[in-house]
Amino acid sequence: MTRPTILQPETIEAALTAVSRVGTPLWLYDAEAIRQRVRKVSAFECVRYAQKANSNTHILRLLREMGVMVDAVSLGEIERALRAGYVPGTPAHEIVFTADIIDEATLARVIELRIPVNCGSPDMVKQIGEAAPGHAVWLRLNPGFGHGHNRKTNTGGPSSKHGIWHDELEESLKLIDKHGLKLVGLHMHIGSGVDYSHLHRVCDSMLDAVRQANRPLEAISAGGGLSVPYAPGEPEIDIAEYHASWEKARAEAERITGSPIKLELEPGRYLVGNAGVLIAEVRAIKRVADKHFVLIDAGFNDLARPILYGSYHEICFVTPEGHEVTGPTHPVAVAGPLCEAGDVFTQKDGGFVEFRELALPKVGDIAILRDTGAYGATMSSNYNTRPLAAEVLRDNGVLTLIRKRQTVAQLLDLEDNGGPL
Ligand code: LLP
């Protein structure tokens, strides 16, 4: 199956309506596209959404309604989950906190709410044990290898800061026993945008860890990392095959421990990546030597993936009347308004400006940057004192503003009432 598309005529219509109401740039998400993705992973007993991909509380609410649990990696993400209606504590474990460190404020909050903590370092196990004996914990392990769509998204192996190095599992188990912590499960997330040649190795490493833990566990987690198609023609992951490999490992883990074990999946990108677009307006078209730059009013402060990873996002232009821009193609780079040369959305992996063969739009046309539902809005910044863009959700033909555009006044307010310390 090829890339699911939300760029249907109704999407273009929704985009134009949203632009007329809240201006550009804006993020537009499709609720039904997200629901379809959730249905695809329903074979997993527990799907725990990695909200860092897109943590808008309205998206979280939509996912909770479908029975999806949530992962939080900061105090802020815990508060988002609560705001969206997730119930903390036992027995459901709707929220799990996953990190490699825990600060004092977050520690106090997870203890107060009895939120299980997925520990990525022995120090974290110790700190939780000392502060709250009996607390529920997971251990996140680094199996010694990893993979990602970019080396910056590889979270396994000797160059990764993430997880407990596999041969420190024993020490972590001792800390768990010493402090009477309750080990809920073992977790591995070797990277984001992985290829699946590593899958069997991850499952084998998980089973080694289960043997070493040598005790009943409630669950094991396969982590996230599932890739989604970005370029036209890119294949979809075979989710049934992926599930089957993990299901085999789960059954084996049950045999080893002699008690029932649930299988968790922790996807972020897979659920929302293809379900969102970034919409901007074309403000200038420049000829530079024999090529063109199309300058739009969104920058890498909005969508950072191309400058950070050289990520590919398909870009389409439509006229204000909703017609896709067609005509003879030219080498075109699409870039933003920021005062930095890397503020270019068409980049080559690990390289720099890429000129794509595109039909030239006109000033006032709309640019649609596709597949930006994951790690788009959540990674935006205020660089160049640019406010965060608005977010709109389309559900059943109805458009809802799910985040207002930030204002410059809001940004400046933070600097007004400081004063001497
Ligand atoms: N679980 C853990 C512990 C994670 O660290 C992550 C992502 C996930 C789950 C979800 O991974 P996913 O299913 O979305 O691949 N900003 C990068 C991706 C960074 C991912 C960070 N951790 C990007 O735009 O590609």
Image (spheres, rainbow, N blue to C red):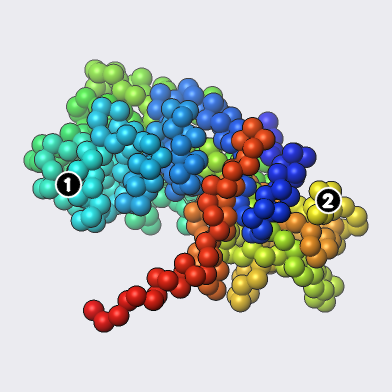
Q: Position of residue 221 (x, y in %)?
A: 36, 33
Task: From the image, tell me which residue sits under label 1.
Answer: 128
Q: Position of residue 309 (x, y in %)?
A: 56, 59
Q: Is residue 114 above or below residue 375?
A: above
Q: Which mark lies nearer to you, 2 or 1?
A: 2
The kind of residue on which mark 1 rests is Ile
Task: From the image, tell me which residue sits under label 2.
Answer: 321
- As drawn, the residue found furthest toward the bottom would be 420
The kind of residue on which mark 2 rests is Glu
Q: Quadrant of the C terminus?
A: bottom left
Q: Are marks 2 and 1 in contact (CB under 8 Å)?
A: no
Q: Is residue 209 visible?
A: no
Q: Nearer the viewer, residue 179 or 106?
A: 106
Q: Secondary structure at mark 1?
A: helix
Q: Give the distance between the C-alpha atoms of the residues marked 2 and 1, in whole angstroms.
A: 58 Å
Q: Is residue 181 above or below residue 43?
A: below
The residue drawn where x is 41% and y is 50% is 155
Q: Quadrant of the rendered structure where residue 35 is?
A: top right
| Other-residue count near label 1 (Cα within 10 Å), few / some / many at <14 / 14–19 / ≥20 | many
Q: Quadrant of the rendered structure where residue 171 is?
A: top left
Q: Position of residue 139 (x, y in %)?
A: 27, 40
The residue drawn where x is 82% and y is 60% is 361
The residue drawn where x is 52% and y is 43% is 269
Q: Nearer the viewer, residue 372 or 79?
A: 79
Indicate left or right for 263 with 112 as reference.
Answer: right
- As drawn, the residue found furthest toward the left would be 178
Q: Which numbered disc, 2 or 1, marks the residue that appears first in the sequence?
A: 1
Residue 419 has which mark? none
Indicate left or right for 45 with 96 as reference.
Answer: right
